[in-house]
Image: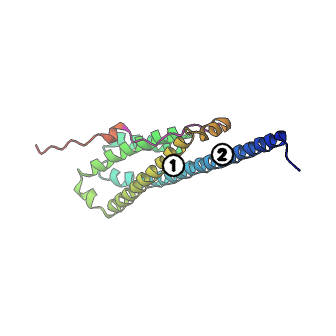
Amino acid sequence: MAISKGAWAVIILLAIVVIMVAVGISKYNMLARMDVAVDEKWAEIDNHLKRRSDLIPNLVETVKGYASHEKELFENIAEARAKLAGAGTVRETMGAANELSGFLGRLLAIAENYPQLKANENFLKLQDELAGTENRIATARTRYNQAVRSFNTAIRVFPSNLIAGFVGYEKKEFFEVPETEKELPEVSFD
């Protein structure tokens, strides 16, 4: 029994449809896994930011004992922590975290002016914990940005871009270092 030309056309058409559906499902699953990976990496950053935020009150209280006249900085740190705790979006969290980093840098710079504070065991321990947490945040930020780069690339290349557009995947934001942190410190020996 011979298959007619019309039957061959239907078989080929069905094979093409099956292949296209299989490719579509594969691309959708890949994008879904990448989207989850970005969320996972963001959760890691969020976890480290929470840990840093939990360390700050103890650090501030320790510094307050030596530098009580820095009231404005302590208030700025408290406000930045509140912004971080209340952040609802990735963009808000990034902004609050970067603002808090700036204030923490100023707080630690103040400590340089107080030799007794720099020698305080509690301050040294908190400073070490904070430094370790900052390193974890930097590592997590790198991992997050790598996941975002992979996801953003995947939703822009063919044929994944068709699936991404169909299901509504949108470009994710990178966790950028603020311009103020990119500036090199000025060193003077005068």
Among the 4 quarters of the image, the one containing residue 125 = bottom left
Which label number is shown at residue 158? none
Q: Which amino acid does label 2 sit on?
A: Tyr
Residue 169 sits inside the magenta stretch: yes
**Residue 122 % position (x, y):** 35, 62
**Residue 52 % position (x, y):** 44, 53
- Seen in the image, is 56 located left or right of residue 63? right
> Could you say which is closer to the camera, residue 23 or residue 15?
15
Visible residue check, residue 57 = no
At label 1, counting other C-alpha atoms closer than 10 Å, the crowd grade (few under 14, some 14-19, many 20 or more) is many
Span of residues in magenta = 168-178
Looking at the image, which residue is at 35% across and 55% down?
A: 62
Looking at the image, which residue is at 38% across and 39% down?
A: 178
**Residue 166 % position (x, y):** 67, 36
> Could you say which is closer to the camera, residue 139 or residue 180?
139
Which label number is shown at residue 147? 1
Among the 4 quarters of the image, the one containing residue 14 = top right
Where the C terminus falls, by quadrant? Answer: top left
Looking at the image, which residue is at 55% across and 38% down?
A: 156
Residue 3 sits inside the magenta stretch: no
Mark 2 vs 1, N-terminal side? 2
Q: Which amino acid does label 1 sit on?
A: Ala
State how far apart marks 2 and 1 are (Cα).
Answer: 17 Å
Helix, strand or loop at mark 2: helix
Residue matched to label 2: 28
